[in-house]
Amino acid sequence: MPSPNEVKIVLEAALLAAQEPLPVSELRKMFDEEIDADTIRRLLEELREAWKDRGVELVATASGWRFQTRASYQRFLERIHPEKAPRYSRAVLETLAIVAYRQPVTRGDIEEVRGVTASAEVIGRLEERGWVEVIGHKEVPGLPAVSATTKTFLDDLGLRSLQELPSLEDIAKTLDLTQTPPPASKPEPASQPEPASQPAPDESATARAV
């Protein structure tokens, strides 16, 4: 069996080479599962500590562990790798917030909170982005779809669970949702393109993964 230091070196190499977060169960396979999960987690924590003063950090997300550049250095990296963040309308961001903080929800629940018709286009954009998915159907007439956020949503925010979501007040400041909301009597037309608004949460709240 390899020594703890050798295990950390292997973990480091695997995580630096990975394109996606790796869960502990996947990391254990490299050692024929001879090393228990608690030991792997302890060594990952030691590895995270070893990288604490560097430009890259080791973080735990909902899907597993990954290395990513620190957010404080992102402005420098953008000068050589400019990336245009996707922009979403106020309707999309408000709908995402409702799903995140009140899930599981139906389209009717979203409409009740926002006071306007929740267009299929808005919900579809969130599903296309991989942040929201249908997890079932409510046992009422019509069997409306029930939606919730995904692990991808948490990964993009750098979170391990929904309990780590920031407060609604902080979300409002981050997204700068200060525009005047549309009148409750006028539903949102599904056929018209959505106006550009603020950057998506994952592009402004997390660092670019290595």
Image (tube, helix red, strand yellow):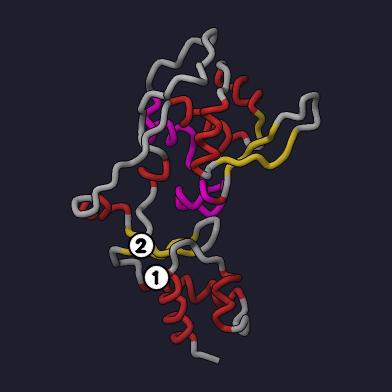
Q: Tell me, yes or no, whether the two marked residues, 2 and 1, touch with CB atoms within 8 Å.
A: yes
| In this view, 72 is above or below 117 | below
Image quarter (top left, top right, bottom left or bottom right) of the N terminus: bottom right
Measured Cα–Cα span from mark 2 to mark 1: 7 Å
Q: Quadrant of residue 123?
A: top right
Q: Say few, some or many: other residues with alpha carbon within 10 Å of mark 1 (under 14 / 14 to 19 / 20 or more).
A: some
Secondary structure beneath dot 1 equals: helix
Residue that protrudes farthest toward the bottom in the picture: 1
Disc 1 marks which residue? 16
| Residue in view at x 42 percent, y 45 percent | 202
Residue type beneath disc 2:
Val
Relative depth, front residue between 80 and 11: 80
Q: Say few, some or many: other residues with alpha carbon within 10 Å of mark 2 (under 14 / 14 to 19 / 20 or more).
A: some
Let me know if residue 166 is in the magenta part.
Answer: yes
x, y (%) of residue 81?
A: 24, 53
Residue 210 tag number: 2
Residue type beneath disc 1:
Leu
Relative depth, front residue between 82 and 60: 82
* Horizontal arrangement in the rendering, residue 53 relative to residue 150 (left or right): left
Q: Which residues are magenta?
A: 152-177
| Residue in view at x 30 percent, y 67 percent | 53
* Horizontal arrangement in the rendering, residue 173 relative to residue 127 (left or right): left
Let me know if residue 70 is in the magenta part.
Answer: no
x, y (%) of residue 22?
A: 52, 66
Q: Quadrant of residue 118?
A: top right
x, y (%) of residue 39?
A: 57, 78
Residue that protrudes farthest toward the top in the picture: 185
* Horizontal arrangement in the rendering, residue 141 relative to residue 77 (left or right): right
Main SS category, magenta section: helix
